[in-house]
Structures are given as C-alpha cells and as structure tokens.
C-alpha cells in the first residue's frame, strides 16, 4: 500500500539541521548501545563455541535462529507501524488518535506470540530432527533447548513492540538502556555463568538456551513501564477520537503494516534461515562455523539498526508533510555516519579474519572465505544506508515486501544449490547475493518515487576515508611492516581525517545541543 504524502507545510531553513541534531543525539546513544550489544554477542558466541562441541554449538545457533524468526513473525510488522503512524499522526495534527493507534497494534502481537510459542513447543522435535540429521545423538537436547526458547517467545515479541512504542515518541533511551545494554549484559552474565557451571555439571543445550533467553523477563517488564510512561507523559489534551476515526485508523494501520509484517519475517529470514539451512543440508558443525564467521554481520546490523531507529520517526514526519529536501538531507547525512562507522569494521574484518577466527577455536579458521564474501556484501549494503527503512517510511510497504521476498528467493535458491557442494561458503554466497538485491532494488525505487538518494558529500567522504585508511594503507604498508604497525598508523590517520572532514560528514550535529524532544 502506498500512503499518500501530504502537501508540504512551511518549514524554517533550520528544520533539516535540527532534525540532524536530534537524529545525531539519539543515533549516537543507540550506536554506542549497539556496539555494546554487538560486543557482548561476540563474547556469547565465543563462550558457546568454546564450551560446547561444534555440533552442539551449531544446534544452539540453529535454535536461536528459529527463536528470532518466530519472534519476528509474532511482531506482525508493528515495529514499523508503531513508529510510522504515531509520527504521522503528530505531524498531521491528529495526536488524539495516538491511544487508539497503540491499542490497534499491541494486543494482536500479544495474542499471536502466544500462538507461535505453542506452535514452536509442539514443532520442536521436528525442527531438531531436520537440523540435526547427521547428529541424532543430540536431538533430545536440541528439542529441549527449542522448548525452553519457546517459553520466552512472547516476552521477546512484547519487548520489541513496547520499545518500538517509545521510539515512536522519539524517545531512544529505553531501547538503548533496556535492549542494548541491560539485556545484552544479562545475557553475557547468564551464559558466562552457564559456561562456569560446566566445570561441575555436564554442558547441555537447555541450560545455555535458558541462560540466553531468561533476560527477556525483566526487560519486558521494564519495557512495558517505559511505554506506559511515554504514552501518559505525552497524552494530548482535547477531544477524544470518534468511533469512525478509530475504525478508519485501524483499517489504515493494518493496510500499511500488513505487507511490512511479511517483509519483516522475510528480512529476518535473510539474516537467520541460512544457519538453519546449513544445519539441515551441511550438518551442525558447518553451521557453527558459518554462524561464528558471520557474527560480525550482526555487529554491522546493530549499528545500522541503532542509527535508523533514531532517524526513523524524523524521516517519517518529513515525508508525511512532503518536506523531501529535509528528508533527503537527513538520509544522506545518516548514511555518511553509517559508512563512517561500519566500513572500517568491514575492512578490518577482511584484514584480520585469519587471526580472530582462531580465537573461537582452530576449527573455525576454515570460515575465512565466508568472512571475505559477507564483508564485501556488507560494504554494498551500508553504502546504500537504511534504504529499506526509507522506502517503508515513504509508505511503499508493498514495494518493500516485494524486494525482501525477491532477495529471500535468491538466497534460498542459491543455498539449496550451493550448500550441498560448498557448505558454509555456499551459504555465504547466497546471503551476499540476497543482500545486494535487497539494497539495490529499493535504492532504485526510492530514487524513482521520491527523488531521495544516499550519495551525498558525507557518504562519499566517509567511503574514501575508510578505503584509504583501512583498505589501501594496510594492504600497502602491511606488506612491508606487518598488519599491526599498519593498523597503528591507520587508526589515528582515520580519526584525523574525520576531524578534517567534519563539515562534510556533518559531525557538528553531535556537538550542538538539540532543542528537539528527548532523544
């Protein structure tokens, strides 16, 4: 469905700068929290890989992939709808419908998540059988681990939806503190405790699954409190919504959100189903290698998500009022920031893959080709910015759905063809091609339908600076002096370059105090 853009309202010349400053404040905090979450995720992966054998580690990664997929389905696309519609209602003077909007989105998620939790519990033996075909001796433990995760599925879905509500009010702090920091730290502590417990008891999949999922309980409670506070603290005065208005809102909400629900599941499938396919077609040990080698991709996705969640409500407001100049400036500035943060990570991963993979165990060094393929794909994806979100905020959720389904079809088709022949590397090739499709298609559609594109001065400056400092310099100097001395020069050179290019990169937004709402 394509939501119509309203006529542009008058705006001051400072509006784009103010939006960038607000996005910078929220985005900086969110990316810092995302960096912490990504780091703790790597440590959790390391503990699981070192404590469990390769087969059991593969089963754990397959189980958590199934859990995340089911949770994404349970959210019914409301992680977009509950940002887009509150932003649109405020921007168009219909704030009295905010309560009706929240009541439209939240209860269906609660009910559907319970249904999916029951389905996952009942299907656990079959999921375990399909993903542990070559390891039947761990099927019982795999089934028990899946059922432990099923119990926590409703809490995961509600946590994400309730935090989405706070972001719809431009409040980023609950997402950062509760999801990025508290949940991640609690998961690391709990999984670490499970790892220590293996000194006295035999390691088991259910024990690690419980440790990984249990933090969703306190975080869900706190997220509910934060969402209630955001709503009551911003409840508009004036007349209540009429029944006809509420009925029309419910219809429009689900017409917009419905395609996004399917797209969200397909998007999660792009990120997770390949682990399940490697487990089913190649075995649990290759699945563990693939999950470990691709762990850095999650770190990149966290950075993208952290920034896009701050930009999302502001971009929705700009597009809802027809202010495409402000929207384009915000999109380009945010893409420059994203490239500035993520391209060095990708290039460092390419340079350091032979070394850091061995930290997880000697068996995981075989994942180097997987790293190289996925890192190249992520350079393309981050260079396009949060293009998928821009398309959705412009109201083109049907196009968004088609793009994600096309990318998913590419990935599954290549996986089925390549995994039996090349194992984890075949899955990496399938995911890389899907990532390229899922970014270039919406990029063309966004430009054609709205005239927006991410290739501003900041994006070009960040890309050239990253390639020079973390691509060219390590390749040339590393061959002469070794990798560590080259990186010792690259890091300060990068920081100095970012400072010199601070105007082009829009970094002044991080230093100025914003007069916008709390970010």
Image (cartoon, grey):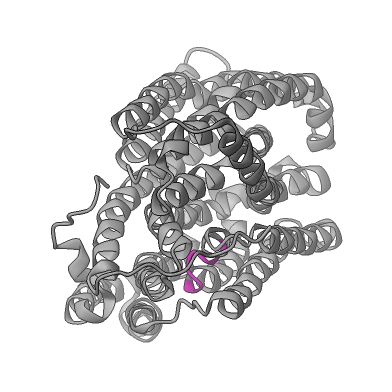
Quadrant of the rendered structure where residue 248 is? top right
User: Residue 35 at x, y = what percent?
Assistant: 35, 50
For the N terminus, the quadrant is bottom right
Tell me, yes or no, if residue 68 can be seen here: no
Q: Is residue 263 above or below residue 202?
A: below
Q: Is residue 386 magenta?
A: yes
| Nearer to us in this view, 167 or 30 | 167
Residue range in magenta is: 383-388
Give the residue at x 30% y 69%.
11
User: Residue 25 at x, y = what percent?
Assistant: 25, 54
| Nearer to us in this view, 47 or 247 | 247
Give the residue at x 25% y 71%.
12
Q: Is residue 305 above or below residue 495?
A: above
Q: Is residue 425 above or below residue 148?
A: below
| Nearer to us in this view, 43 or 63 | 63
| Nearer to us in this view, 307 or 126 | 307
User: Residue 46 at x, y = what percent?
Assistant: 48, 40
User: Residue 278 at x, y = what percent?
Assistant: 75, 49
Q: How many marks?
A: 0
Quadrant of the rendered structure where residue 175 is? top left
Q: Is residue 458 above or below residue 519?
A: below
Give the residue at x 77% y 47%.
277
In the image: residue 73, left or right of residue 174: right
């Amino acid at each position: 469905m394509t939501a119509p853009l309203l006529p542009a309202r008058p705006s001051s010349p400072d509006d784009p700068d103010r939006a960038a400053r607000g996005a910078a404040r929220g985005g900086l905090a969110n990316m810092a929290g995302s960096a912490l979450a990504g780091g703790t995720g790597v440590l959790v992966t390391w503990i699981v890989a070192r404590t469990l054998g390769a087969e059991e580690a593969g089963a754990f990664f397959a189980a958590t992939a199934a859990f995340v997929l089911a949770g994404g389905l349970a959210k019914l696309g409301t992680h977009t709808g509950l940002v887009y519609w509150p932003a649109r209602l405020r921007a168009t003077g219909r704030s009295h419908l905010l309560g009706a909007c929240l009541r439209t989105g939240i209860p269906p998620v609660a009910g559907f998540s319970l249904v999916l939790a029951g389905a996952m519990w009942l299907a656990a033996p079959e999921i375990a059988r399909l993903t542990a075909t070559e390891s039947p001796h761990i099927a019982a433990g795999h089934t028990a681990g899946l059922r432990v995760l099923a119990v926590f599925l409703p809490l995961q879905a509600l946590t994400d939806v309730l935090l989405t509500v706070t972001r719809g009010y431009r409040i980023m702090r609950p997402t950062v503190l509760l999801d990025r920091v508290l949940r991640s730290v609690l998961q690391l502590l709990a999984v670490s405790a499970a790892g220590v417990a293996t000194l006295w008891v035999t390691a088991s999949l259910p024990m690690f699954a419980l440790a990984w999922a249990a933090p969703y309980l306190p975080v869900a409670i706190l997220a509910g409190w934060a969402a209630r506070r955001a709503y009551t603290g911003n409840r508009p005065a004036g007349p209540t919504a009429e029944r006809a208005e509420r009925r029309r809102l419910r219809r429009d909400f689900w017409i917009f959100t419905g395609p996004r629900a399917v797209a969200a599941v397909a998007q999660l499938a792009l990120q997770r189903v390949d682990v399940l396919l490697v487990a089913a077609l190649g075995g649990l040990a290759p699945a563990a290698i693939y999950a470990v080698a691709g762990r850095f991709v999650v770190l990149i996705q966290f950075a993208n998500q952290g920034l896009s969640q701050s930009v999302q409500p502001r971009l929705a407001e700009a597009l809802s009022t027809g202010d495409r100049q402000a929207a384009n400036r915000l999109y380009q500035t945010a893409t420059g920031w994203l490239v500035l943060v993520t391209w060095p990570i990708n290039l460092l991963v390419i340079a350091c893959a032979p070394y850091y993979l061995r930290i997880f165990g000697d068996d995981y060094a075989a994942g180097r080709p997987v790293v190289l393929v996925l890192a190249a794909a992520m350079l393309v994806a981050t260079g396009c910015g949060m293009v998928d979100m821009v398309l959705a905020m412009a109201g083109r959720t049907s196009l968004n759905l088609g793009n994600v389904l096309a990318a998913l079809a590419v990935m599954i088709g290549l996986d089925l063809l390549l995994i039996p022949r090349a194992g984890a590397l075949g899955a990496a090739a399938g995911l890389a091609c899907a990532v390229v499709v899922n970014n270039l298609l919406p990029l063309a559609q966004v430009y054609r339908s709205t005239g927006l594109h991410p290739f501003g001065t900041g994006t070009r400056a960040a890309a050239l600076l990253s390639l020079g400092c973390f691509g060219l310099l390590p390749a040339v100097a590393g061959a002469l002096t070794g990798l560590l001395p080259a990186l010792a020069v690259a890091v300060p050179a990068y920081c100095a370059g970012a400072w010199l290019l601070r105007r082009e990169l829009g970094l002044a937004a991080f230093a100025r105090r914003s007069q916008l709402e709390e970010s």
